[in-house]
Amino acid sequence: MTARNAILLMVKQSQGITYNSLLGKTAQDFGSINSARASLSRTLKDAVSFGLLKKKDNSYFITDKGSSSITFEMKNKLLMKLNASLSSQKKINELDSIVEQLQTVIERSKNDSELLRDARTSATFYVSDLVDLNAIVNSRIRRLSYLSKTLSRQLKSLEELNFNDSFSLPKEKYSAKKISLFFSSFGLNEFFVECPQDALEKISAEFPVKSKKPSFSLKKEFLKSFLEFAFRLKVSGPDTIKIYFSSVKARIFPDSVLVSAPFSEIKKLRKINY
């Protein structure tokens, strides 16, 4: 939208608006208040001289000519955009926009005889073009429906074959408890940890870590408290703290903990209540 049309629209929406109010609405588009003031003054002067606006004291009002001008510009812009979308070689990728634009033109044309006339005469597309587009859409819907059903069957097969799955949890105390209860179902006595080197010293100060390397094991009774501690720990760099037990791996990220394991195990984890 041009600067003049933007000003006309502001005045049309707020008849009697003052110069300072217009300046406040437009100043953010300029590098300095002086630039904004110069542009606004020039635009208002031209609009008044062309009879699009009238000035009374320090207030501005849109004229019938100005109202017709902005209405024509907005209608023309709408029709031009629709024509461009439907003439595009990739119009199927603009389907959402095309449907929205068509709906706008149809609804407005019902109450605006001038827009209806302009739409009929200026449209560069035919109803048959939309019939063809609709046929492409329906073909894709059938294809997507087939793919969706096929993918659903494949997902079921992957679940039955026990492929790996994952489950994300927030770094909260109840997540530590949920993972601990999950761990207890395996009947194991220890879990294994990998951590960045800079985290090892902090972990060793809180837990009985015997190894000097950032790869060690801890007894099962420490899992819940270790998780809660690891959730609070700030780790530098891209590495994460990883916890392993049986076929399960838990990776602690800045905002969450991601547990990965065979599908059957993740299914158990999702069902755990506490």
Image (cartoon, helix red, strand yellow):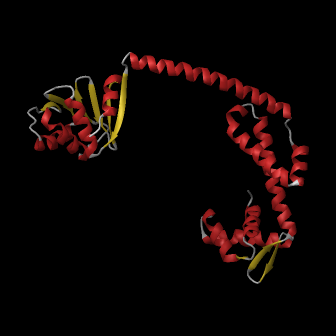
- Total residue callouts: 0
The answer to whether 197 is drawn above or below residue 112 in the figure is above
Residue farthest to the bottom, as pictured: 57
- In the rendered image, the quadrant that contains the N terminus is bottom right
Q: Is residue 234 visible?
A: no
The residue sitting at 81% across, 52% down in the picture is: 108
| Figure quadrant of residue 146 | top right
Who is closer to the viewer here, 182 or 240? 182
Q: Is residue 6 left or right of residue 170?
A: right
Q: Is residue 173 left or right of residue 188?
A: right
Who is closer to the viewer here, 19 or 79? 79
| Figure quadrant of residue 69 | bottom right
x then y, percent, for residue 104: 76, 48
x then y, percent, for residue 158: 42, 18
The residue sitting at 51% across, 22% down in the picture is: 152
x then y, percent, for residue 151: 52, 21
- In the rendered image, the quadrant that contains the C terminus is top left
The answer to whether 224 is drawn above or below residue 129 in the figure is below
Q: Is residue 52 visible?
A: yes
The residue sitting at 86% across, 55% down in the picture is: 112
| Figure quadrant of residue 20 | bottom right
The residue sitting at 73% across, 81% down in the picture is: 58
Q: Is residue 102 left or right of residue 174?
A: right
x then y, percent, for residue 224: 19, 40
